[in-house]
Amino acid sequence: QVHFVESGGGLVQPGGSLRLSCAASVFTLDFYGIAWFRQAPGKEREAVACISSSDDLTYYADSVKGRFTISKNRGNNTMYLQMNNLKPEDTAVYYCAIDRRWYSGGYCLLEYDYWGQGTQVTVSS
């Protein structure tokens, strides 16, 4: 079983920035596909940003392109989501996820092996 420590969520004004971190109880994330999902009240969970395991290509949802950046450090067990120019519609619980499948192409999987517990992001004035 993999455990996660998520941090960085909180309340921010529109136009502000937050950086989410997710540390997994694995030696390194180098060989995992990683992703950030979010779920707003009354809405379905949606993929925000993903990195495929074998080629490190990225995917971003249209709603966050140019504002969010997903990353992970080589040889490290921590992944990040830098969120800039935040909007009220970004308000949601954000979840990190990782998967052991080896794949390429920069897309998000439908399911991931392991999920973080979630961190609340609220964008409001």
Image: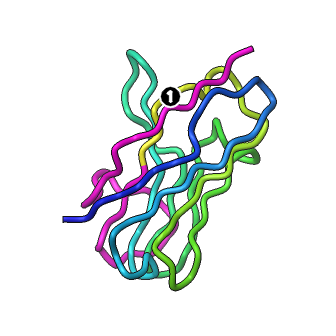
Q: Position of residue 80 (x, y in %)?
A: 58, 59
Q: Eyeballing the image, is 46 above or below 75? A: above
Q: Secondary structure at mark 1?
A: strand
Q: Quadrant of the C terminus?
A: top right
Q: Quadrant of residue 63?
A: top right
- Tell me the residue that label 1 is attached to: 92
- Name the outermost residue toward the left: 1
What is the magenta segment's predominant secondary structure? loop
- Name the outermost residue toward the bottom: 75
Magenta region, residue range: 96-125
Q: Position of residue 66 (x, y in %)?
A: 76, 47
Would residue 45 appear left or right of 111 to someone viewing this image?
right
Q: Residue at x 45, y 56 (%)?
A: 35
Q: Residue at x 37, y 81 (%)?
A: 27
Q: Please check the rendered image and state whether residue 104 is part of the magenta-colored stretch, yes or no.
A: yes
Q: Eyeballing the image, is 49 above or below 26? A: above
Count of all numbered marks drawn on residues in the image: 1
Q: Please check the rendered image and state whether residue 56 is part of the magenta-colored stretch, yes or no.
A: no
* Identity, as a three-letter code, of the amino acid under mark 1: Ala
In the depicted view, which residue is nearer to us: 88 or 66? Answer: 88
Q: Eyeballing the image, is 62 above or below 123? A: below
Q: Residue at x 67, y 51 (%)?
A: 82
Q: Position of residue 57 (x, y in %)?
A: 57, 71
Q: Residues within 10 Å of mark 1 (few under 14, many from 20)?
A: many
Q: Quadrant of the N terminus?
A: bottom left
In the depicted view, which residue is nearer to us: 81 or 44? Answer: 81
Q: Position of residue 70 (x, y in %)?
A: 60, 58
Q: Quadrant of residue 3?
A: bottom left
Q: Eyeballing the image, is 60 above or below 53? A: above
Q: Residue at x 40, y 21 (%)?
A: 43
In the depicted view, which residue is nearer to us: 121 or 107? Answer: 121
